[in-house]
Amino acid sequence: MDHKLIQRAAKDILNSKKTIAFTGAGISAESGIPDFRSAGGLWEKFDPEEYADIHAFHTNPEKVWLMLKEMFSLIMTAKPNPAHLGLAELERMGYLSSVITQNVDGLHQLAGSRNVIEFHGTHRTLSCLKCSFTLDGTSLKMEDLPPRCSRCSSLLKPDVVFFGEPIPWEAQTVSFKESKSCSAVLVIGTSAVVYPAASIPITAKERGAMIIEINREPTPLTDGISDYLILGSAGEIIPAIIEEVKRIR
Ligand code: OAD
């Protein structure tokens, strides 16, 4: 961990009028939820075209639910890690306006973050594709897959965005409003290859915001969009930044 960059990030947060966080699967890796594209990630095991596409879900829900079942059991038992907790603390201290997350695990909210925008929806609730009945993931029985609606017996789908589905309108609108009005973005644990999500930091940069990237490796944003990259694990870097913010504020 580069301490000079930790100090720089703390100063940039203190000098910023409005800071937002943009997070991806890497922030939840230390909570035991593998990301998608790293070695050992979800897309190594499940081809996204076969498992994460909305047409695949309609054509072969039994198969897609095998992956969803695995995601459910990981997500429902996962706990927030120091990176999630750190962002919640930064918000409580008044230095973070919102967290825009591509994650569907609900760990930011569990950590105590209040203003969370779920760009790709959530795994914690499900909806019936026919009658729109919604239920909480904790009350889901996994014995018979795919699970069906208790009211009308139609297919249940987690409220996550599949490839081929639109981004929830409100999440998209609020996210881009945040990205256009902020002066710094913490881009944490995302490969930044999935659009339109990845255009959030780019939009902010175009409006003059400082882009602070935290990742175990460089991404397509690193050269050209990010002002600097703090290399390492989010679970170590975020708490270190918060400590520095507290020390110098
Ligand atoms: P990816 O799996 O594409 O990228 C995860 C990023 O996190 C990589 O750049 C890793 O280097 C980094 N990383 C992993 N562990 C880390 C750690 N402990 N600390 C810091 N960085 C770490 O995940 P996303 O960018 O979130 O969409 O993927 C974007 C979207 O693609 C997801 O929301 C999902 C997926 O398809 C949908 O399902 C619609």
Image (cartoon, helix red, strand yellow):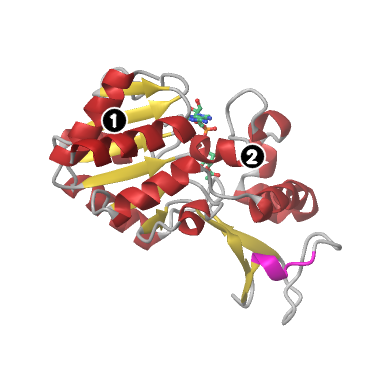
Total numbered circles? 2
User: In the image, what residue type sits under mark 1?
Assistant: Ile
Let me know if residue 140 is in the magenta part. Answer: yes
Task: Tell me if residue 203 can be seen.
Answer: no
Is disc 2 surrounded by few (<14), some (14 to 19) or many (20+) residues within 10 Å? some
Please name the residue shown 76% across and 75% down the image: 153
Mark identifier at residue 32: 2
Q: CA distance from mark 1 to mark 2?
A: 24 Å
Q: Residue furthest front?
A: 247
Residue 162 in percent (x, y) is at: 56, 49
Let me know if residue 214 is in the magenta part. Answer: no
In magenta, the rendered stretch is 137-141
Dot 2 falls on a residue whose secondary structure is: loop
User: In the image, what residue type sits under mark 2?
Assistant: Gly
Residue 42 in percent (x, y) is at: 66, 35
In this picture, is 239 found above or below 68?
A: above
Is 169 left, or right, of 62 in this rendering? Answer: left
Label 2 CB less than 8 angstroms from ligand 1: no
Mark identifier at residue 212: 1
In this picture, is 137 found above or below 74?
A: below
Reading the chain from its start, which is encountered first: label 1 or label 2? Answer: 2
Is 149 left, or right, of 227 in this rendering? Answer: right
Dot 1 falls on a residue whose secondary structure is: strand
Task: Tell me if residue 101 can be seen.
Answer: yes
Chief secondary structure of the magenta portion: helix
Residue 239 in percent (x, y) is at: 40, 37
Mark identifier at residue 123: none
Please name the residue shown 68% across and 34% down the image: 47
Please name the residue shown 59% across and 75% down the image: 132
Q: Quadrant of the N terminus?
A: top left
| Quarter where residue 49 is shown | top right
